[in-house]
Each structure stands twice: as C-alpha cells, then as structure tokens.
Image (cartoon, rainbow, N blue to C red):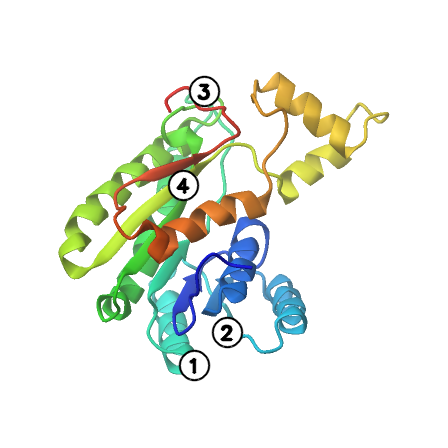
Amino acid sequence: MSLYSLQGRTAIVTGGSSGIGLACVELLLEAGAAVAFCGRDAERLRRAESDLRQRFPQGQLLAQVCDVLDGESVNAFASASLAALGAASVLINNAGQGRVSTFADTTDSAWTEELHLKFFSVINPVRAFTPQLQSQADAAIVCVNSLLASQPEPHMVATSAARAGIKNLVRSMATEFAPQGIRVNGILIGLVESGQWRRRFEAREERDLDWAQWTARLAQKKHIPLGRLGLPIEAARAILFLASPLSAYTTGSHIDVSGGLSRHA
C-alpha cells in the first residue's frame, strides 16, 4: 500500500522498459498515477507494456518508442502523452548508460558522444515537458544519476565527468524552476542489479558461484558496507519520494542510494 496517492496525476518515465525505470512505472501505477513511459527498444517496450497491463488492468498507461537524444522524437512523445493522459506533473529522467574508459583511452568522438548522451537525455525531456509541468501544482522533475557524480572512477573518466555535470545541472534547474513551482532533484546510485551485471555474471570465471555468492563477493570487493548490490525497486522508492508531495519542501537535492558506498555523504 502506498503512503500517498498520486491519483489524478500524470507521470513521465524515460528509459522505462527495464530496470529502475520499469520499477518506477510499477510504483507510480500502484500509487494511482497515469503513466507514460518510453524506450528505444520496441520489442522490450512491448513486453513491458503487456506485463504492466496484465498486472494493472485499471491503470492508465501509455508506452511509446522514443529516442531521448532526438528532440523531435521527445516532442512527439510529449504530445502523445498530453493527448492520452493529460498534462504531466512528474518527469523522471532515467535514460542513459555508462562508458568504461580511462582518460588515455577516450577519443574526442567518445567524449562528445558521452557528454551529449548524458546532457541531452535530460535536456530534451525537460524542454518538451516543461510547458506541461508549469501548469500543474507541485510539479517535480527527478533525474537518475550515479555516485560517479561525486566519487569519480578512473576507469570511467568520461562518464564520471558527465555525471558531475548533470548533478550541477539539477541544482541549476532547481533554482531556475522554483518560481514556476517545479521542484528538481536527483538520486545518486551505486551498484544496482541490472542486465549489465547479469551479463557479467553469465560470463564469470568462478563457475562455482551462484548469483547471490557472486554479487556478495563483488560487493565485498567494492567495499559496499551493506554487502550486496541494490535492487531497482530500492532506487525507484527514493525516486518516488522525490516525485511525490512527501518531498514538497525539497529541491536541488540528491539522495544517495549506494548501500553506504559513498565517501561524501
């Protein structure tokens, strides 16, 4: 049972067909919100939508293929959502992935691609949905970010730099949008279970270890105090808090969801 109701509200989730994004869609539907979510993979999106409609037969739901790096595609998604579900009062920016490379290994084109991905996966949806958010009471934007924003890793230099930029973008937008009644916050995730970690598990050398043992060893190696990887639903709960009236006096902030890994709390 939800601690609050989002009945009558419309929420937007980018990158919503799997992982943290899909967990957000589920929690939003449970709270009574109408939800529009998007992703680039049409088949994955179709499977997610089919499952959600079976689990939430009364839920108001829109799923649309959308490339968040394409402004026209995002504008089309915003128009479709407005027509189907009404004006959005919540925007969750979740699209994006990490790049493994050191400074020496990162080419000019790789720098450009990574910075463009991280920034415009936020900029395009914010531009497209701001007119809708401005018309709603207690509107909220939540950006899914990484602990790399505060705690960079040398093997992910471009992603770390881009993530730090997004953290500051959240703070800047929070100040600029506050007079319009739009709150802007983010979460900083550590190691969270995902398809990427599942693929690494399948390719593991230690074939005698099961998933629980392998992830426990990984958590120990990474010095995660809670001794395990996070779950997508755990990140989604923090996002939902920031998207809901429970955080009505919070803007320009970030919640650490890293199992205690952060050295900058």
Among the two numbered marks 1 and 4 on one chain, the one whose residue lies closer to the N terminus? 1
Q: Which residue is drawn at 73% across and 33% down?
A: 201
Q: Residues within 10 Å of mark 1 (few under 14, many from 20)?
A: some
Cα gap from disc 1 to disc 2, whole angstroms: 7 Å
Point out the residue furthest to the right here. Answer: 208
Residue 50 is labelled as none
Q: Name the kind of residue labelled 4 in the image.
A: Ile
Circle 3 sits on which residue?
Answer: 154
The label nearer to you, 1 versus 3, is 1
Query: Mark 3: which amino acid?
Result: Pro
How many numbered marks are there? 4
Q: Do the residues labelled 1 and 2 touch (CB within 8 Å)?
A: yes
Question: What amino acid type should be assigned to the residue bearing mark 2?
Answer: Leu
In the rendered structure, find residue 84 and report the number of the disc placed on it: 1
Give me the residue at 41% from left, 71% from top: 77
In terms of secondary structure, where does tag 4 sit? strand
Across and down, in percent, residue 238 comes to 45, 45
Residue placed most toward the observer, 24 or 106 = 24
Percent coordinates x, y for residue 179 in the rendering: 13, 56
Query: Callout 1, which amino acid?
Result: Ala
Instruction: Report, in whole angstroms, how far the alpha carbon at label 4 lies from the one at label 2.
Output: 25 Å
Q: Label 4: which residue?
A: 187
How far across and down, in percent of the image, does residue 225 sit?
56, 21
Residue 71's image quarter?
Answer: bottom left
